[in-house]
Amino acid sequence: MKNSYFTLAALTLAAAAPALAQTAQERQTRAWAASCAACHGTDGVSQGGIPTIAGVDRARLLELLLAFKRGERPATVMHQHARGYTDAELERLADFFSRPKR
């Protein structure tokens, strides 16, 4: 009987592992996105002269971020911010801001 409990517990943990990893990855992305709020507003919704990035098409936002990173798009500070992330991290940020918030 004990083995069946251990087996059930192991299967439950194995099934939950991808969800836990995804949650950790999502938390990390939200932490990165929080630094964007200083200029682009909470969840990317600007209240001023800085563009809103919430809801921008993922591919377009990634294109802009990569252009800032490569120095191909004029910027005051965005090129410095973008250079602080890997391309994969910028992809995660573009995905985050392109999705509607709940």
Image: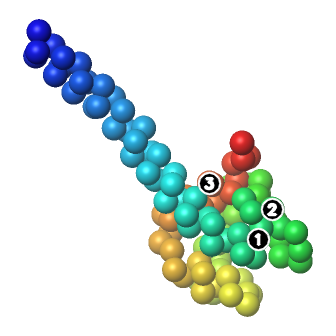
What SS does tag 3 mark? helix
Frontmost residue, 80 versus 21: 21
Residue 40: which disc?
A: 1
Amino acid type of the residue that numbered disc 1 sits on in the rendered structure: His
Mark 1 and mark 2 lie on one chain; the one further toward the N terminus is: 1
Tell me the residue at 88%/69% (across/down). Answer: 47
Question: Callout 1: few (<14), some (14-19), or many (20+) C-alpha neighbours within 10 Å?
Answer: many
Give the mark, 1 or 3, whose residue is nearer the N terminus: 1
Q: Residue 20 bears which disc, if any?
A: none
Using the rendered view, name the quadrant where residue 42 is placed.
bottom right
Picture coordinates of residue 8 (x, y %)?
23, 19
Q: Is residue 14 above or below residue 49?
A: above
Percent of width and height locating residue 83: 54, 82
Nearest the camera: 81 or 3?
A: 3
Q: CA distance from mark 3 to mark 2?
A: 15 Å
* Quadrant location, the C terminus: top right
Kindly identify which numbered label has been placed on residue 45.
2
Q: Is residue 50 above or below residue 75?
A: above
Q: Earlier in the sequence, mark 3 or mark 2?
A: 2
Within 10 angstroms of label 3, few (less than 14), some, or many (20 or more) residues? some
Above or below residue 80? Residue 92 is above
Q: Name which residue type carries label 3.
A: Asp
Q: Residue at the location (40% across, 42% down)?
A: 20
Determine whether label 1 and label 2 are within 8 Å by CB: yes
In terms of secondary structure, where does tag 1 sit? helix
Query: Which residue bears the numbered disc 3?
Result: 95
- Circle nearer the viewer, 3 or 2: 2
Q: Residues within 10 Å of mark 2 (few under 14, many from 20)?
A: some
Q: Position of residue 11 (x, y in %)?
A: 25, 24
Q: Which residue occupies the extreme right position in the image?
A: 48
